[in-house]
Amino acid sequence: MIFSQDTFNIPQIDGTSGQVVADIQRTFALSSTPRSISDSGATRIPSVQDGIGTGETDFKLVVKTKTGEYVEKTFTVHVTANWHDLSMTEIN
């Protein structure tokens, strides 16, 4: 699951330096697994697998069965500073 929210527009602080992060380095979307979301409850951001800045990022999703069959799809995630504009396009 990839998601964005309005709180990503507030200043973000680098954990090491304590300085405000430049826009080009900010996170505007997050990627989480369904398990991390279901374990988190509604009051906090789920366990983050990866942060995504503005621009386009490709993801490959592979779902395998226990018998070895699988489905593979690649998507481009389109991220802007406006969380309402988060979108995804299948590219294969």
Image: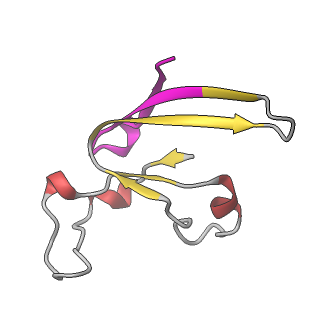
- Residue 88 in magenta? yes
Is 9 situated above or below 2? below
**In this image, 10 relative to 85: left or right?**
left
Q: Which residue is found at the position 24% from the left and 58% from the top? A: 26
Vertical position of residue 50 compared to residue 69: above or below: below
Residue at point 69%, 27% (across, down) = 71
| Stretch in magenta | 73-92
In the figure, is residue 59 to the left or right of 35? left
Report the residue that reaches farthest toward the right: 67
Residue at 26 percent of width and 79 percent of height: 15
- Left or right of 69: which side holds 76? left
Q: Where is residue 35 in the image (x, y as percent from the top left)?
A: 69, 59
Q: Does the magenta segment cover residue 90?
A: yes
The type of colouring in the image is secondary structure
Q: Which percent across, then down, holds residue 82?
A: 30, 43
Q: Is residue 5 above or below residue 44?
A: above
Instruction: Residue 55: name its quadrant.
Output: top left
Nearer to us in this view, 91 or 38:
91
Residue 52 is left or right of residue 2, and the answer is left
